[in-house]
Amino acid sequence: MALPADVTTGTWTLDNSHSEIGFTVRHAGISKVRGQFKDAAATLDLAENVADSTISATIQTASFDSGDANRDGHVRGEDFFDVEKFPEISFVSSGLVAAGASYELTGDLTIKGVTRPVSLETEFNGVAVDPFGMTRAGVSAETTISRKDFGLTWNAVLDAGGVLVSDKVAINLELAFIAPAA
């Protein structure tokens, strides 16, 4: 699969201020809590043949933000991300395959020192030149993981049955990349 005509090959860099790395997890079985990571870096190495392209990313676990300081402190602590021992989450792609109008991006996700393969349904949202002359590309991606697969096992049993935090975590990415300098 070839690149669209308006997309340049080379190393594109994540525009962290115009990207969102978020997730959703069910809380107490009755509601969903959303969070995001505010500090990440990524490179997208675009090849002429899109299938040969690669992406690698690192996320600073201490940048977790759910909008609630108490919850954020707990999630950053030893029960969940343990940011002192595991300051980064990483992703390194291993494949990209066209799947209709979208793509399937596969790769290795590492959380708390545990690496597992994941597959993300990915959508290319196009390219635009901003008012400052920067060429940008937009990408959306999503997947669902088991947090237990990555050693995130803390939980609390509820009196009415069930647990406080679901095992399944939906990951939602809205990413903007900046083209390599001409």
Image (cartoon, grey):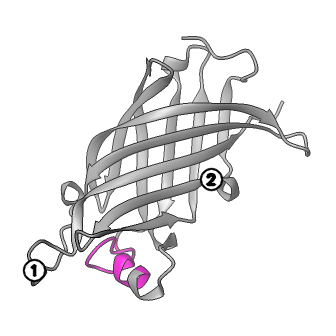
Q: Where is the C terminus found, in terms of image quarters?
A: top right
Residue extending furthest toward the bottom: 70
Q: Which segment is the magenta one?
A: 72-85
Dot 2 falls on a residue whose secondary structure is loop
Q: In this picture, is 75 found above or below 123? A: below
The rendered magenta stretch, by its main secondary structure, is classed as loop
Residue at image mark 1: 160
Occupied quadrant, residue 93? top left
Q: Residues within 10 Å of mark 2 (few under 14, many from 20)?
A: many
Residue at image mark 2: 19
Closer to the chain start, of discs 2 and 1, is: 2
Residue 138 located within the stretch drawn in magenta: no
Can residue 125 be spotted in the picture?
yes
Q: Residue shown at 11%/79% (left/top)?
A: 157
Pick whichever, 163 or 46, lies toward us. Answer: 163
The span from disc 2 to disc 1 (Cα, nearest Å) is 39 Å
Q: Residue 72: horizontal and vertical position, in percent? A: 43, 80
Q: Residue shown at 59%/20% (left/top)?
A: 47
Pick whichever, 45 or 143, lies toward us. Answer: 143
Q: Amino acid at mark 1?
A: Ala
Q: Residue shown at 60%/11% (left/top)?
A: 2
Residue 79 located within the stretch drawn in magenta: yes
Q: Amino acid at mark 2?
A: Ser
Dot 1 falls on a residue whose secondary structure is loop
